Image: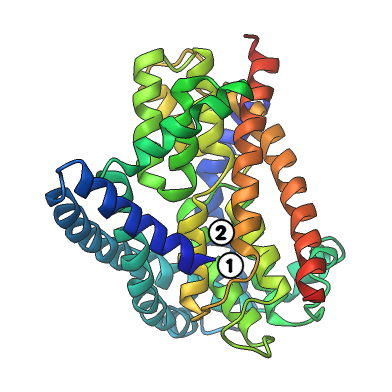
Amino acid sequence: MVNVIWLLLITSGIIYAGFNGRIEVVTASSISAAKSAVELAINLIGVMCLWLGIMKIAEASGLIKVISYILNPVVGLLFPSVPRNHPAMGAIIMTISANLLGLGNAVTPLGIKAMQELQTLNPKKDTATAAMCTLLALCTTGFTLVPATIIALRSAAGSVNPAEIVGSTLVVSLVATIFVLVVDRLCRAVWKRQ
Amino acid sequence: MLIRLCEQLSVWAIPAVLFVIPAIGYLRGVKVYEVFVEGASEGFYTAIRILPCLVAMLVAISIFRASGAMDACVSSIEPVLRLLGVPSDLVPLAIMRPLSGSGSLGMATELLNTYGPDSLVGRIASTVLASTDTTFYVLTVYFGAIGLSNPRYAVLVGLSGDIVSFLASIYICQFVFGA
């Protein structure tokens, strides 16, 4: 599916630009996007190092085991294929917690760490497991209690009450998260049969 | 009150985590500095492994946007969305949200400045932005980091979440803030 979407994005863009006589836009935008991708990855190195370092301390001190133990009954329901004491469970819980607290740049490193741990449980290394899909579903919905960036954006635009969207955001996130988890379960069942 | 608590929570969360984890580690006899460096050293390779995936995805999205194909796509699905009660000014944001984080942030800023942050459109745009993450970025980075080539149904689930949170943002904001 990613292959098709990727191809469609590129080919439809080029054909559209060609028919409208602005083919030069394609060259400029593809080169500048490639550059900004590198910038993004380089910027990621710093926060990756920071959070992976902190995670390692949490792991070595047994803190993650304790947190996992407490939250396991809840999170374990969502990830039935992950063994209770596996490090992946700790990493998943940290990712979800960072998401909830709105720790924007901590979420990505922790999520990647969780995926790497899940990969150790994966029998087919090039194919996503059910647990990976569930984690991705949770992360793309990005359930957050504190949308800090948006609040800042609204107050910069001169809002009388910049934080008033916190309530509506919570309800929307809740609806979307529940929906996504249901779709995830349905897809899991359908794909298993194939 | 609740909102102030949330704001304080977001300001204090990172400092608290950076304080508590090393402190507990030290008390439990972990060589905190050495262990931190050991963990951090993985960060570099992970970021580098993601780089080619990011280039591939960002280039494709950028071509799609800059060529005007995205705008064409927006105007072709606009009638359908209007039938569902979507204000036409929000349609571009719906398409942009799963594709690009910075793009949708820019679009929302523009909407906030044009309509005012306290207008219905402004509130909906804020909610849309706050309640979902950039699906394609998350997909690219998370699966790219472990070298997956077959994401199975993950894209489908992610995009269905985007559609639902977009529609829910509109309906719930209309309900909460009044039309």
Would you say B47 lies left or right of A137 here?
left
The answer to whether mark 2 and mark 1 are in CB contact below 8 A is: yes
Q: Is residue B26 visible?
A: no
SS type, badge 2: helix
Taking the view exactly as shown, the residue that stands out farthest to the bottom is A123
Spot occupied by residue A42 in the image (x, y as percentages of width and height) = 28, 67
Q: Is residue A43 visible?
A: yes
The C terminus of chain A, quarter of image: bottom right
Amino acid type, residue under disc 2 in the picture: Val
Taking the view exactly as shown, the residue that stands out farthest to the top is B179
Q: Are marks 2 and 1 on the same chain?
A: yes
Residue at the image point whose x is 74% and y is 67% from the top: A67
- How many marks the image carries: the answer is 2
Spot occupied by residue B148 in the image (x, y as percentages of width and height) = 53, 79
Asked whether B20 or B100 is in front, the reply is B100
A18 w.r.t. A38: above or below: above
Would you say A12 lies left or right of A127 here?
left
Residue under pointer 2: B17
Subunit ID for the residue under disc 2? B
B28 w.r.t. B68: above or below: below
Residue under pointer 1: B21
Would you say B136 lies left or right of A86 here?
left
Residue A67 is tagged as none
SS type, badge 1: helix
Spot occupied by residue A80 in the image (x, y as percentages of width and height) = 83, 72
Residue at the image point whose x is 40% and y is 83% from the top: B41
Would you say A130 lies left or right of B80 here?
right
Amino acid type, residue under disc 1 in the picture: Ile
Spot occupied by residue A6 in the image (x, y as percentages of width and height) = 41, 63
Residue at the image point whose x is 33% and y is 74% from the top: B52
